[in-house]
Image (spheres, rainbow, N blue to C red):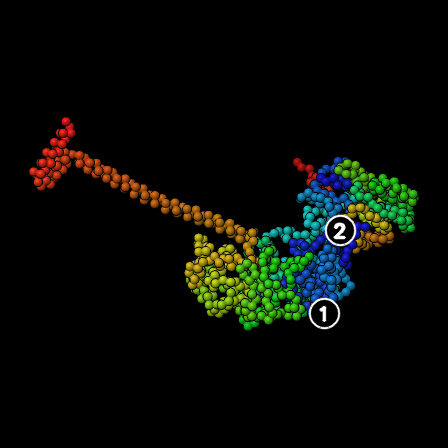
Amino acid sequence: MSDNQLAVEVVRGEMQPWSDYNGKRGAVGGPVLRALLNDVLPAGARTLIIGPHAADLVSVVVDKASSATMLVRSVSDATGLAEQFADLDVVAGALDGLTGTTYEVVVAVDGLDRVLGYDSDDLSWPQRLDALAELCTPSTVLILGLENEFALTTLLDRRPPAERHGDDEWRPLHDDPTRPVSPVQLASELARVGLPLQTVYSSFADNTLLAVDVAAAARPGSLPARLATEALEATDVPLLAPIAEGVESASRAGLLASTSTGWLAITGAPLQHAIYTETGPGVLTATRADDGWSTTTQPSTTTGTPGVLPSGANGAHGALPSGTPTSGAPATGEAGAAGGPAAFGAAPTPRLSVRDVSFDGSAIPSVVSGGISVETVLLRLAAAEDVPAFRALAERLGEWALAQTGQLVLRWDDIIVDGDSFSFGVSGWVAEASRNDLLAAAWQRFHDRLINTHRRHPWPPWMVGDDLVTSWLAMSGLPDTRVARGKELVGALAVALGTVETPAPDVRTALADAERAKQELVELKGHVFGLERTLGFRDKALKTRETRIREMRLQVQKANAERTRFRNSRAFAAATLIRKAATIRNPRQFAGKVKRRLKKQLRNRF
Amino acid sequence: MHHHNHYYGQAHILARYAGLNDEHPPRLRGYLQHGWNIGDGWNPVHEFFDGAWRFTWSDAPRRRGHALGRRNYHSIGAPFLYLLDLEPSLGVVPEEEREGTLWFLFHGWEGGKIEGDHKRLIDEIRETEPGPVTFSLYYTEYDRPEIRKSYEDAGFRVVSFGRRGFSYEGTDPRFLYKQLAELRKHKRVAANRLSTAVFYGIAAGCEPAVYGDPMQMAGENPLFGGEARIARLWPELLGKEIDLAAARATTELELGVPWLMPPAELRMLFDWRERV
């Protein structure tokens, strides 16, 4: 018969052939979500996972649950999961095909967009939530993801809507008018089905989670805004404009929570940390403290080798080029199993090396200032063309930086204006380099971020590059400092952060690049005109001098001719004879000599 | 376009519906689905040229094709539905005179022959069907005397509607006309697999049944999930006694009744409009 011999239970609505894991989008996963699940999931619960979740998340659930069931729509994905997780009951099929029981915990981090097959009914998002609610009780711990249609990455996506969702959208799920598009609407939907919301996180590409109140209160340059920017800059969405500008505008408007890439709603469990973010090979969590943030780090508990079920997260691990040497092995297991984050320094911190930089979690302060970044201030001063204030700040930065110890790579986007001084942020990247080179790296990174994003500044184009960095270093008290090593450090840091410049910049940047090239052409044409003009003046001056020289030469020739004529004259000969005759002192002796010479000449003649 | 478009005379029917010559139907700009299946309307290894448009009967094949990375679909409804519109009286008999069962054996094709226990199937049909049975064989089975004779010996009337053709040759353009006429004479339609003919029968007013040994065909590709998937998705169409209302509702979707379109629109869709 034409049937497949399936090794997993199949319910109505399964897809074959199909894979959510091997497609472009991949399964949801990554260390940040893993850390969140570690904090949120109760131990010993009957748990259901719905939708494609990467192996690192599945393993957390399986470790914590008394029994774990997973529903995926693809038969081949289900088969792979069943082979990989012996303690996991895997069901292939659609959400509306799974009925008959309820669960104490439901993990749907991937959301409700990949839970139906092409043969399923056309269920709206609320209808899919209804189907999900049938599997829950009012006390169920539910972790539910929701993609945001109003996300900055969607608003700035340069692809037309029809090309954004690949093969997933045989029905236009994202056009669903009943779909929640804000945390408030999401909370309302959950309340409607009897699952009161306790916590909502704004998710930024699954690399940074911010509690929505934290995100809403974030202002440009603050820690939440910086983390959101960093997470979004690492995404691979082709953009119309730089994402950093969008984040800045949204945070100024108090809309950062509304423009994240998605949300994670949690019912039945309280908030643990206000911030989760990927940092190096681990995860940094933060909670509010007086005028700042109390931070902890959790070493990554995944081996990073998900095998047949690769993580879809676009984090630092995923961003590293293949073959990038790494050192040290991430810690495994215990931190997550213990149910809480390891206090910083209490557990060995994994180290990750990328070329010249390596990650040292112990370098991150346990309390981070809540102020804005130095970069934010510098950019404002540059835009205002306030060079004196820029110079004064650079001088203070130089004094502060040279007085620090440790090997943290200086980056003005993670140094915080802390009253009259400065303090370090949450970057744990260090490098073996002199303090001068670290300072050079800070200015080089600032240079790249200022210039590459076409921000306004007062420096002429021919200064852009090493001259400008050298000038800023001089403002910081380091004249004549070489910038080559700083450049290397910046390049290595960009690789480590996953923000290496992409071959295709956003459209606005591309247009600005083209405009800048055009402007440069105009200016260079002007420069050539100026040079030609100068050459013309010089040429004219040369001609004047040439004429003068020619005139003088004629005068000299005339004088020489007169002199020759004079020397050939009889008068000159007579004068010469007289002059010589006047020099005879003994006429008798002279007459004798003349007589002898005459005789000799006569003899020779005859 | 592709010679599959001529299978069973489907292109001919659409040309006639569009008001054009149906003896030599014009070139159809794309691929026309020629049978119901649980994939995207074509066999899993069918080759399409880049940028080809695919004209499916209904939306489900379009959705499945989208998941396969294919685009440029347009659902138009099955040509058989257009034939029903064109031939409202062909083969029609008074309702009370419709009798017996038109039974379709799952058929092979030019590249694959079916294998199964025909004797056992005959016994089951005899036990099940209340009236006379007309047995439809595709020519690949009709031309195999050992198969045809086994059904004739069972007392069934054996018919074949002709050939679907290949490379524009040998197509019987009246294939679906003959099938429609037979269906309209019978009270029931039955098959050993849920298949195109069952949907056609329901559309022509028959009571459906799907039962018996589904048999096997060499080289069948279970890529889309096979019979088990059919059982999960269309349980209302499997069995000897089927809820007619539910069957008709499903048939309307699978044959694409909501996607039927007027002739003028069809002409434009197929690039059949006259240009001045």
What residue does disc 2 label? B224
Q: Is residue A190 visible?
A: no
Which residue is found at the position 80% from the left and 43% from the top? B112
Closer to the camera in the image, B92 or A170: A170
Position above or below: A390 against B84: below
Q: CA distance from mark 1 to mark 2?
A: 38 Å
- For the residues beneath circles 1 and 2, the answer to whether they share a chain is no
Q: Chain of mark 2?
A: B
Q: Which of the two marks, 1 or 2, is nearer to us in this view?
A: 1
Residue type indicated by callout 1: Gly
Closer to the camera in the image, A508 or A14: A14
Residue A346 found in image quarter? bottom right
Residue type indicated by callout 2: Phe
Q: Chain of mark 1?
A: A
Residue A493 found in image quarter? bottom right
Q: Is residue A420 visible?
A: yes
The numbered dot on residue A44 is 1
Q: Residues within 10 Å of mark 2 (few under 14, many from 20)?
A: many
